[in-house]
Amino acid sequence: MIILTPFVNVLHFQLSAILSIIKHITMKPHPFPFIDERKKTIQFHLKLGAASHVALSGSFNHWAKDELEMKHVKDDDWLIEIPMLPRGKYYYRFFIDDKMWMEDIENQLREPDGVVGFYSVLKV
């Protein structure tokens, strides 16, 4: 049986705390939308529990409401991966249950839509 001195106990506690912080930083998910240069794709993610159908719609697909259906991957997570777009600036939203538009709350880039809401902005 090893008896640790109070000093060693404090060092052990501090080291555990530091390792926990490092793990949290390194495990942090990438921002969305995620541009994957290697795979030449763009990944969009939405966390929404009360939906039965979600579509991605934007200036890159002429705001089609049924063309880019997201997959319900688990619990409240919806995901879609689209082919890389040409360089430029695009506007998009999610279309929920064929009746409601929603901006991407995980994307801080937004611009007013000219009515009462916002477009989410994608820069490639």
Image (spheres, grey):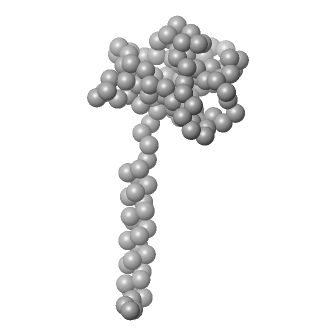
Question: What count of labels does the image hold?
Answer: 0
- Return the residue found at the far top: 62
Residue found 52% across the figure and 17% down from its top: 68
Which image quarter holds the N terminus?
Answer: bottom left
- In percent of width and height, residue 105 lies at 57, 32
- In percent of width and height, residue 72 lies at 57, 31
In this rendering, the answer to whether 100 lies above or below 76 is above
Q: Quadrant of residue 74?
A: top right
Residue found 43% across the figure and 20% down from its top: 82
Query: Is 104 placed left or right of 33 in the picture?
Result: right
Residue found 38% across the figure and 28% down from its top: 35
Nearest the viewer among 29 and 67 is 67
- Return the residue found at the far left: 38
Which image quarter holds the C terminus?
Answer: top left
Visible residue check, residue 17: yes
Visible residue check, residue 111: no
Nearest the viewer among 11 and 29 is 29
- In percent of width and height, residue 81 lies at 44, 25
In this rendering, the answer to whether 27 lies above or below 14 is above
Q: Quadrant of residue 101?
A: top right
- In percent of width and height, residue 80 lies at 49, 26
Nearest the viewer among 75 and 48 is 75
Query: Is 40 placed left or right of 113 in the picture?
Result: left
Query: Is 73 placed left or right of 82 in the picture?
Result: right
Residue found 43% across the figure and 55% down from its top: 24
